[in-house]
Amino acid sequence: MARPRTTPRTVDHPDLTQVDLQQVMEALVDPVRRMVVSQLAGKGEDMSCGTFEVPVSTSTLTHHFNVLREAGVIRQYYVGVTKFNTLRTGELEERFPGLLPAVVAACAEEVDPGTA
């Protein structure tokens, strides 16, 4: 019989002062990860892992979330058994001014040329 969990689930996140621009850019070079960032930015609210519209399997999407989290682009947290994702907008703007809005605009342009 499994023991009940006595401590809440937590997820480790890097201090953005320890993340360099190359790590963030490498995370954002993948089109699926840019889709995740665009959807979070467009929605304007936190999203659970299962609500993203992406052309990959759940296990592959988990990998993409991990890369984004380790690069400091997103923050993840649990509500019960559901994992939520949020952009680290303010922190990223402070560390790399203008980067996130530029990425979101570029993604919109990729999807629908002439929108940015």
Image: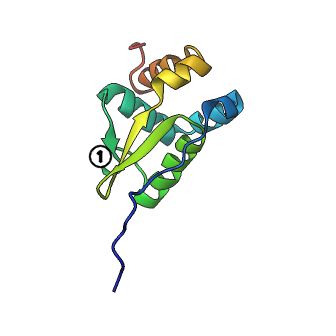
Task: Decide: is 67 above or below 15.
Answer: below
Q: Quadrant of residue 41?
A: top left
- Badge 1 amino acid: Thr
Q: Measuring 29% from the left and 46% from the top, which residue is drawn there?
A: 51
Which residue is under mark 1? 51
Relative placement, left or right, of 68 versus 10 is right
Task: Decide: is 8 above or below 12.
Answer: below
Q: Residue 38's spot in the image, x, y percent?
A: 41, 30
Q: How many marks?
A: 1
Instruction: Name the outermost residue toward the bottom.
Output: 1
Relative placement, left or right, of 71 versus 86 is right
Front residue of 18 and 115 = 18
Front residue of 59 and 75 = 75
Q: Quadrant of residue 42?
A: top left
Relative placement, left or right, of 51 versus 7 is left
Task: Decide: is 89 above or below 67.
Answer: above
Q: Residue 8's spot in the image, x, y percent?
A: 38, 57
Q: Measuring 33% from the left and 36% from the top, which residue is drawn there?
A: 46
